[in-house]
Image (spheres, helix red, strand yellow):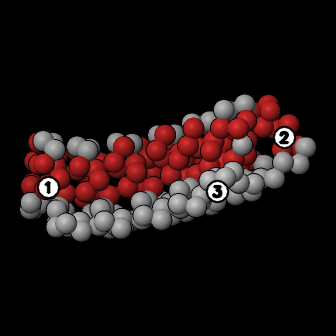
Amino acid sequence: MQAAGANRVETSQALIEKGALMDARNARGQSALLVACYTGAGEAAELLVAYGAPVNAPDRGGLSPLLGAVQRGDLNLVRLLVFRGAPAEAPSAAGLTPLMQAAYSGHDAISGFLLERGASTSARTASGLTPLIQAAATGRTAICRMLLERGADVNARDAKGATALTWAKSRNHSETAKLLQSVGGIA
């Protein structure tokens, strides 16, 4: 796991060829692939996938290799994981989906790819956050536009009653707020 997380590809390959278990976990329940994805060790992650590492292996908190790749902004790794079977919608234990993470982090290309692969614009976290609210809260106007074009509910409310427009305004994201208002958003 340490070799994969440090992107030491040759060491990782040698360990795999000597019989290292592809589904072994560390004390936190993380697989080598999950560690590689979260640390940005793309080459090691690609090697692990090529050798058959389970792409749907979340840790105890429900964090998956795909969420790690999204968080790091690695579109190539996101594509590889999805094409190898990682569900574009797999949420964490708190309900965070890869699309929500991409929207929050401002990864336009990843957001577009996940939407093309069927990611839902209406998914919600345990606190009621949607991908649109996540994007609006961080001022990701282009992603908000993309989500709205795919049918996101501009007036969906989180658990405290706040809409995407409420979030955009509260964080002084004027361009995002203007877009949301132009399509009927209310605060």
Whether 118 is drawn above or below 169: the answer is below
SS at mark 2? helix
Amino acid beneath label 2 = Leu
* Residue pictured at 81% horizontal, 38% vertical: 13
In-front residue for pair 119/41? 41
Which of disc 2 and disc 3 is earlier in sequence? 2
User: What mark, if any, has residue 165 been given in the picture?
Assistant: 1
Q: Nearer the viewer, residue 123 or 95?
A: 95
Q: Residue furthest front?
A: 27
Query: In the picture, which quadrant includes the C terminus?
Result: bottom left
Mark 3 vs mark 1: in front: 3
Q: Position of residue 181 (x, y in %)?
A: 9, 55
Residue 98: percent from the left, percent from the top?
45, 55
The CA span between labels 2 and 1 is 51 Å
Q: Report which residue position mark 2 lands on.
A: 15
Secondary-structure class at tag 3: loop
Callout 3 amino acid: Gly
Left or right: residue 24 compared with residue 184:
right
Instruction: Give how far across and how far down residue 180 sits, in percent.
Output: 14, 54
Frontmost residue, 170 versus 75 = 170
Residue 25: quadrant of the picture: bottom right
Q: Residue flagged by tag 1: what amino acid is it?
A: Leu
